[in-house]
Amino acid sequence: FPFCTFWSMLSLYLLPAKNGEEPTMQFLLEVVDILTNYIRKTFDRSTKVLDFHHPHQLLEGIEGFNLELSDQPESLEQILVDCRDTLKYGVRTGHPRFFNQLSSGLDIIGLAGEWLTSTANTNMFTYEIAPVFVLMEQLTLKKMREIVGWPGGEGDGIFSPGGAISNMYSVMVARYKYYPEVKTKGMSAAPRLILFTSEHSHYSIKKAGAALGFGVENVILLKCDERGRVIPADLEAKIIDAKQKGYVPLFVNATAGSTVYGAFDPINEIADLCEKYNMWLHVDGAWGGGLLMSRKHRHKLSGIERANSVTWNPHKMMGVPLQCSAILVREKGLLQGCNQMCAGYLFQPDKQYDVTYDTGDKAIQCGRHVDIFKFWLMWKAKGTSGFEQHINKCLELSEYLYTKIKNREGYEMVFQGEPQHTNVCFWYLPPSLRGMPDCPERRERLHKVAPKIKAMMMESGTTMVGYQPQGDKVNFFRMVVSNPAATKSDIDFLIEEIERLGQDL
């Protein structure tokens, strides 16, 4: 087959076209070449983390890369150019110097798993069309429940599109457990129900309150100590206050690894209050759940086995490719009871196999992506011990950063004491602000430092790290480490880069 003619070829020459095998293989080999080049460069520190362009620049089109959709088919050569450019103008989240999000890294086994998943292209709702994946999901979820500490790994669970949806499941299931009639009659069948969560918790608890009809006014925020951990006495006072108003406290969310500070709420003390007042305890371990894999660090989630439900995102701390988030429920049958609709065209009761393996009716989705295979494959390849080593290493790196900057000139820590997770929160003070007494003007100027440094970082493409304000604190950097490729030299580089870019501000 004369294969120098990609310019003149269209996708309709590929399989299932007659004689489409040869061009299909050639085309896919070209795609794999683009992908492997990208992977090689991702781990090369001389490559930029991103080649930044403003939205209007990408929309106007750059050197043959045009986002507009066409009426006529374009050549396979153009399609390959589009693949290459899409990666070129994106962000290398696997780069050892990408510290911007809780999920980072590019695990090669996980990537292979995702390729296989896309090739199999099936749906997770029934054993009928996803037999192997359904069994993998069941076994992996059971293993995760064992690690949480529920006897024999009993209970239930499902993989969802992310931590926000997993947290939403926990609220739905709690409501169903205490007020099952809401499923049929709606919220008018229940008293005014109250949810409690930390002022530092993820916004998804508020979002669940809004989406599920509780109303955000009925999501009560709890005070935290200076390290960002919930104060149990404040929870008890607010439970009593709600009861005195005639409301019903239903649900408490304890955060294990908060988004900004990486704080771990005191689960045992919160569990005592949940037992005392007959409330559902959920632990949002989306970010911190991975620490359960480490014998050295799992004590930070002490008491998690007392939770009624747990969110745990392997796509964050454990480096599994997006998306991979689990909601685990201690009591079996609740997920099914809460969400089941018995669709006759999917969940026929008279199939020839054991239909309890049809998991689709537990989900709020119908179609569900196969998130399990890459995770299962990585677990096989690394073993539990491999995940443990990865987690220990990331925490060592954040300790290294903390030790390096806590007494360094030009740095101020946002809170005192060693970080509980890989989150290290700090201000960088340019020389012009050092020695200036704390006053509104200093705060106003400091507030602008992190955004300016971040903008310059992105323009030069060297590294990425997040910043934000929190409460009355002006913008500070939030450094997180979850990428297995990161090393001490990358931490050193980040500090040098902040100082280089911030020197003259």
Image: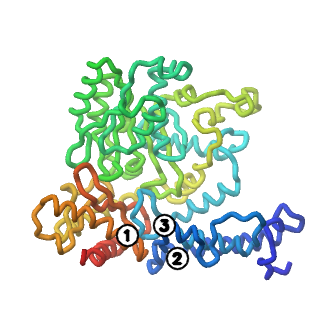
Precedes in sequence: disc 2 or disc 1: 2
Badge 3, how many Cα within 10 Å: few under 14, some, many 20+?
A: many
Task: Give the Cα distance between marks 2 and 1.
Answer: 23 Å
Q: Nearer the viewer, residue 113 or 10?
A: 10
Per the image, the residue denoted by label 2 is 41
**The image quarter in which residue 305 lies:** top left
Does residue 152 appear in the picture of this structure?
no
Tell me, for residue 361, which label it has, or none.
Answer: none
Q: Which amino acid does label 1 sit on?
A: Ala
Q: In which quarter of the image is the N terminus?
A: bottom right
Precedes in sequence: disc 1 or disc 3: 3
- Report helix, strand or loop for mark 1: helix
Task: Give the Cα distance between marks 2 and 3.
Answer: 10 Å
- Report helix, strand or loop for mark 3: loop
Task: Give the Cα distance between marks 1 and 3.
Answer: 20 Å
Per the image, the residue denoted by label 3 is 94
**The image quarter in which residue 123 lies:** top right
Per the image, the residue denoted by label 1 is 455
